[in-house]
């Protein structure tokens, strides 16, 4: 029998994502032990060289690093709680999705049982796992990350975010906000143009160009947010408010849903009500960085 090494890894959870993760680990030559509640899902991986553990306990004992990818944190607790006393000395890397508080709570729970804990977010779909296109965010103790980086690099492009276990989940939801913001804004435009017989394909190159230009503003605006000063170098919030009124009125006149632009305008109006109309757009962070936007 080959002796165990630090690059040995256990993968718990063989759904669509876990199966892809295990395949990538095997592809990079890691001795990979797998466990899944429904054992039959491991059959294909076993033909590729995976070792199937009979129990969660055996799976934990097989490797110094244990990667988990089940539906959610509740499922993860169901898997790990009965074997909690076997976690000591392991590096537990949870790639199941959740929020930052669940990640921090899981970290406390794992560390109380003697395990180092890394929390991760997968910004990718299963077919891209194992390629550079699969971005995997990790946060938690840096020593655990660097010591086992070859395992994470086998899965895709890994980014270590820092010691706070909640950071990967926070980046994950922030990324989703970005994605849906862009998609909803594009669909609003598609709906408007459709009233003039312009199809989505015709509008989309223009939309993509504008989206790219807008993305180009972000670094400068980030600097304003970080400094807390909003000089109106390009356009004031008052000017933006005027444009939003055109968007709302045009949408309403054409029978297109105006809820989204009305939401943008409501935030801008609140900022203007507290004398911020002469500042630049990112001053809206003061409305967004609190639970309920207010007109102080
Ligand atoms: N698929 C994606 O594109 C994608 C992308 C990014 C992140 N993720 C995240 O990756 C995680 C897994 O996603 P997936 O697509 O692989 O989901 P999936 O195909 O539905 O697989 C779910 C996995 O969780 C296991 N599981 C669920 N409840 C369990 C329990 N109570 N006890 C033990 N095992 C349990 C399932 O075991 P059984 O096989 O026995 O049912 C299965 O292995 C999720 O948190 C998801 O948000 C997925």
Image (spheres, rainbow, N blue to C red):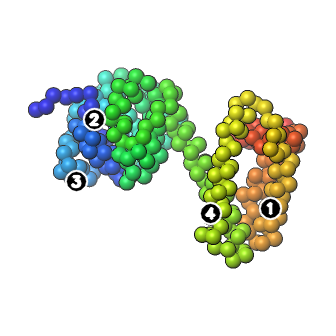
User: How much space separates mark 1 and mark 2, taking CA atoms?
Assistant: 54 Å
Eye-nearest disc, 1 or 4: 4
Residue depicted at x 47% and y 38%? 137
Disc 3 packing (10 Å; few <14; some 14–19; many ≥20): few
Q: Which residue is mark 2?
A: 9
Q: Which residue is mark 1?
A: 248
Residues at badges 1 and 2 in contact (C-beta under 8 Å)? Answer: no
Q: Which residue is mark 4?
A: 205
The answer to whether the beta carbon of the residue marked 2 is less than 8 Å from any atom of ligand 1 is no
Question: Dot 1: what SS?
Answer: helix
User: How much space separates mark 4 and mark 2, taking CA atoms?
Assistant: 45 Å
Q: Relative to residue 168, is residue 188 drawn left or right?
A: right
Q: Depth check: 48 or 234 in front?
A: 234
Residue 227 horizontal/vertical position (percent): 73, 29
Residues at badges 4 and 2 in contact (C-beta under 8 Å)? Answer: no
Eye-nearest disc, 4 or 2: 4
Disc 1 packing (10 Å; few <14; some 14–19; many ≥20): many
Question: Dot 3: what SS?
Answer: helix
Dot placed on the residue nearer the N-terminal end, 1 or 3: 3
Disc 4 packing (10 Å; few <14; some 14–19; many ≥20): few
Q: Which residue is mark 3?
A: 44
Q: Is residue 149 above or below residue 292?
A: above
Dot placed on the residue nearer the N-terminal end, 1 or 2: 2
Q: Is residue 256 above or below residue 222?
A: below
Residue 143 horizontal/vertical position (percent): 40, 22
Question: Dot 4: what SS?
Answer: helix
The answer to whether the beta carbon of the residue marked 4 is less than 8 Å from any atom of ligand 1 is no
Question: Dot 2: what SS?
Answer: strand
């Amino acid at each position: 029998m080959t002796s165990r090494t630090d690059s040995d890894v256990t993968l718990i959870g063989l759904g669509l994502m876990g199966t892809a993760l295990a395949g990538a680990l095997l592809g990079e030559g890691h001795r990979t032990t797998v466990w899944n509640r429904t054992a039959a899902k491991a059959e294909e991986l076993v033909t590729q060289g995976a070792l199937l553990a009979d129990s969660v306990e055996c799976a934990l004992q097989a490797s110094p690093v244990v990667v988990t990818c089940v539906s959610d944190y509740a499922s993860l607790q169901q898997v790990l709680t009965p074997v909690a006393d076997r976690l000591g000395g392991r590096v537990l890397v949870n790639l199941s999705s959740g929020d930052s508080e669940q990640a921090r709570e899981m970290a406390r729970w794992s560390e109380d049982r003697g395990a180092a804990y890394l929390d991760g977010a997968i910004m990718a779909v299963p077919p891209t796992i194992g390629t550079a296109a699969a971005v995997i965010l990790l946060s938690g103790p840096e020593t655990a990350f660097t010591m086992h980086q070859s395992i994470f690099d086998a899965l895709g492009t890994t980014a270590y975010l820092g010691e706070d276990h909640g950071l990967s989940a926070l980046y994950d939801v922030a990324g989703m906000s970005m994605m849906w913001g862009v998609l909803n804004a594009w669909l609003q435009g598609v709906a408007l143009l459709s009233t003039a017989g312009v199809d989505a394909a015709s509008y989309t190159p223009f939309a993509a160009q504008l989206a790219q230009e807008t993305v180009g503003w972000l670094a400068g605006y980030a600097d304003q947010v970080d400094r807390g000063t909003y000089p109106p170098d390009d356009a004031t919030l008052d000017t933006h408010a005027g444009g939003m009124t055109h968007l709302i009125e045009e949408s309403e006149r054409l029978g297109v849903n105006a809820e989204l632009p009305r939401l943008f305008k409501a935030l801008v109006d609140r900022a203007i009500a507290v004398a911020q109309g002469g500042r630049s757009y990112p001053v809206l962070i003061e409305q967004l960085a609190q639970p309920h936007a207010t007109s102080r």
